[in-house]
Image (cartoon, helix red, strand yellow):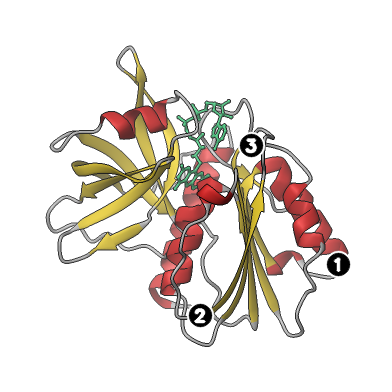
Amino acid sequence: MGGPHHNFLAAAAAWDMTMTQATNTPARPQLPAYTLTVVESFDTEPNMRRVRLRLPTHSAFEYLPGQAIVMMIPTGNGEFGRRDYTIRSMDRQAGTIAVDFLKHGETPGPRWALSARPGDTIEIRGPRGRTVFQPDADWHLFTGDETCIPAIAHILETAPAGARAFVFIEVAGPSGEIALPSAADVQIRWVHRGVQEPGPSELMADAVAGFTLPAGRGQAYIIGETCNVRRQRRDLIARGLTREQILSEGYWRPGRIGGHDHVDD
Ligand SMILES: Cc1cc2nc3c(=O)[nH]c(=O)nc-3n(C[C@H](O)[C@H](O)[C@H](O)COP(=O)(O)OP(=O)(O)OC[C@H]3O[C@@H](n4cnc5c(N)ncnc54)[C@H](O)[C@@H]3O)c2cc1C
C-alpha cells in the first residue's frame, strides 16, 4: 500500500506510540494539531449529538473513513482531557467535519457536545487509527456498539459497490437501529442489549459465533468495549482468521477515562 493511505497510517501509528508508551526517549513525531470552530450542534438521534466543526482556512486535512481525532475536551476547573472521536464525515467544500457524540452519561465528551455553541473553539490532533477499509478483502465483518456507529456508518457509505459486508451492532433495543446506507452489499444484524448495562458481556461474542465465515479472504473490524473486542478477536483467531485479518481497537472500557486500548495480541 503506497501513497496517501500509507502516510496516514504511518502517522497514525506514530501517534499511537506517543499515546501508549511512557518512556524517557525523545518524543516521537506527533500528529498535526488543528483548532476547530463549532458551526452547529444538534441531535441526530435521541442518544447521539452531532457537532459540525470548521477547519482552519487552507488546512490540508486528509483522513480515511474509520479514523478518529483526539479532542481536548474541557473536564472542569479549566482543565482538559483527551477524548477520541471518529470523523463521521467531511464536507470539503465547506471545510467542515462532523463528529457524533454518544450521550452515554454526564461525562465530559457528551457534556461538551451538548453545550457547544457556534464560534466555540476546540483543539484536536489527528487523524489517527488503523481501523480503515481494506479494499482487497473478499468480505468484511464489522462489529461494534453505539460508539462505533460513526465509524461503521462512514466506512459503509464510502465502501464500493461489489464489496460484501456483514455488520453486527449492539444497541439497547429496536429504537437504537438506524439506516446505514451503502453501495456495498451489506447485511446488518442488530444485537439488542435489553435491560443489561452497556459493557463487557457475551452478547456480541455469541452473535458473531453464530456467523458462518464466508469463503475467501475476510477482513474483520472489531471495535467497541475493550473486553468484548478482546474476546471476539480471540474467538476469530480460534476459528482460523490470522491476526492481520482482524483490525481491532478498544474504544472504551468501564472506569477508563478517555484514550484507547490496543487489542492486537
Ligand atoms: C478510535 C476511537 C473512536 C471513537 N469514536 C467515538 C465516536 O465517534 N463517538 C462516541 O460517542 N464515542 C467514540 N469513542 C469512544 C469515546 O472516546 C469514549 O466513550 C470516551 O470515554 C468518551 O469520553 P467521555 O468524556 O464521555 O467519558 P470518560 O470521561 O472518558 O469516561 C467516564 C466514564 O464513562 C465510561 N464510558 C465511556 N464511554 C462509555 C460508553 N460508551 N458507555 C458507557 N460508559 C462509558 C468510562 O468507562 C468511564 O467510567 C471512540 C473511541 C476511540 C478509541
**Mark 2 element type:** loop
Mark nearest the camera among 1 and 3 is 3
**Mark 1 element type:** loop
Using the image, tell me which numbered label, if any, was put on residue 239. 1
Residue at the disc numbered 2: 184
* Mark-to-mark CA distance, 3 and 2: 29 Å
In the displayed structure, 101 sits above or below 154; it is above
Q: Residue 1 location, x and y as percent? A: 51, 78
Residue for point 73% across, 85% down: 216
Residue for point 47% across, 65% down: 180
Nearer-N-terminus badge (2/1) = 2
Residue for point 83% across, 58% down: 235
Q: Residue 257 location, x and y as percent? A: 53, 27
Using the image, tell me which numbered label, if any, was put on residue 198. 3
The residue sitting at the front extreme is: 174
Occupied quadrant, residue 218: bottom right
Q: Nearer the viewer, residue 118 or 5?
A: 118
* Mark-to-mark CA distance, 1 and 3: 26 Å
Type of the residue with mark 2: Ala
Q: Residue 65 location, x and y as percent? A: 42, 64
